Image: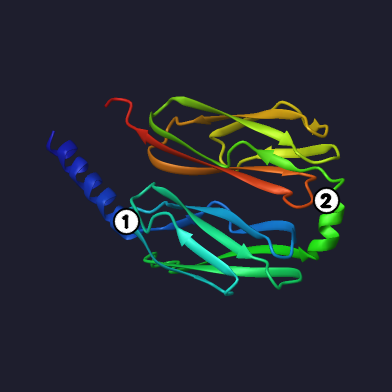
Amino acid sequence: MKIINLYSILLFLTISLNAQVVGPKISILEETFDFGNVPEGQIVTHNFVLTNTGGEVLEIQRVRASCGCTAAKPEKDKLNPGETTSIKVEFDSHNRSGEQKKYVYIFSNDKENPQTRLEFSVNVVDKYSQAAAEIKSPKLILSKTQHNFGKVKEGEVVTLNILVKNAGDNNLEISKVESTCNCITTVLSNKILKAGDSGSIKIDLNTSDRKGELTRVVNVFSNDPLNPNQSITLFVNIEDRKK
């Protein structure tokens, strides 16, 4: 019995020591993003998702953009272990032209990775020629680009239906709907929508084996020339099922 108790104590000390060694750790869901073609003068935004996969509180000390045309702001600046947040990046294409590549730097108390770099690219096109082409182009409209499921018991599957509409004048082709998280499944009602037609995207988020506040992103890719890649950001607070 004493041997078992001694082993339990040593195991507990080992786990505690490992947690201290790990410390806070920043993990990025996607470090790059492509806005595609954007007409000069338009402001576009994207949410980068990050998670604290370490054993201590992660502090986002500062976020800096490489260009004055870019603004970046974190939703939260302190994350408990396992907690997720998003950093909203905004790019202003006024007085810009051609292919652009910009960077956003995140400074945190992650000792192994104190500076993390995000990257996005965009092709700024002439607004007049693009506007002329847009008259006979498809246009993807999503009923919402953010949704908060609120508090959910661990193990539940929550569902969201997003209305998809083609507000353009040509056929809209949705090439794919995907998420980098295996906890999310999507069902698209129609891959091709004629001008004025609507469809839906059913999103199921499985909370099994997850806990705390999470943020996940679903990306929608289409032949919309102005917004070929649009994202839906999901928020959920997963509670212990025993509570």
Say whether residue 4 is left or right of residue 110: left
Please report the residue visible at 21 percent of the width from the left and 42 percent of the height from the top: 7
Q: Which residue is mark 2?
A: 134
Give the image quarter of residue 187.
top right
Please report the residue visible at 85 percent of the width from the left and 48 percent of the height from the top: 135
Please report the residue visible at 81 percent of the width from the left and 56 percent of the height from the top: 131
Using the image, determine if residue 226 lies above or below residue 5.
below
* Outermost residue, left side: 2
Residue 25 visible to the viewer:
yes
1 and 2 marks in contact (CB < 8 Å) = no
> Is label 2 in a helix, a strand or a loop?
helix
Q: Which label sits in the foreground, 1 or 2?
A: 2
Amino acid on which disc 1 is placed: Val
Give coordinates of residue 93: x percent, y percent.
68, 66
Give coordinates of residue 11: x percent, y percent.
25, 45
In front of the other: 41 or 199: 41
Quarter of the picture holding the N terminus: top left
Residue 187 visible to the viewer:
no
Give coordinates of residue 112: x percent, y percent.
42, 67
Q: Which residue is mark 1?
A: 57
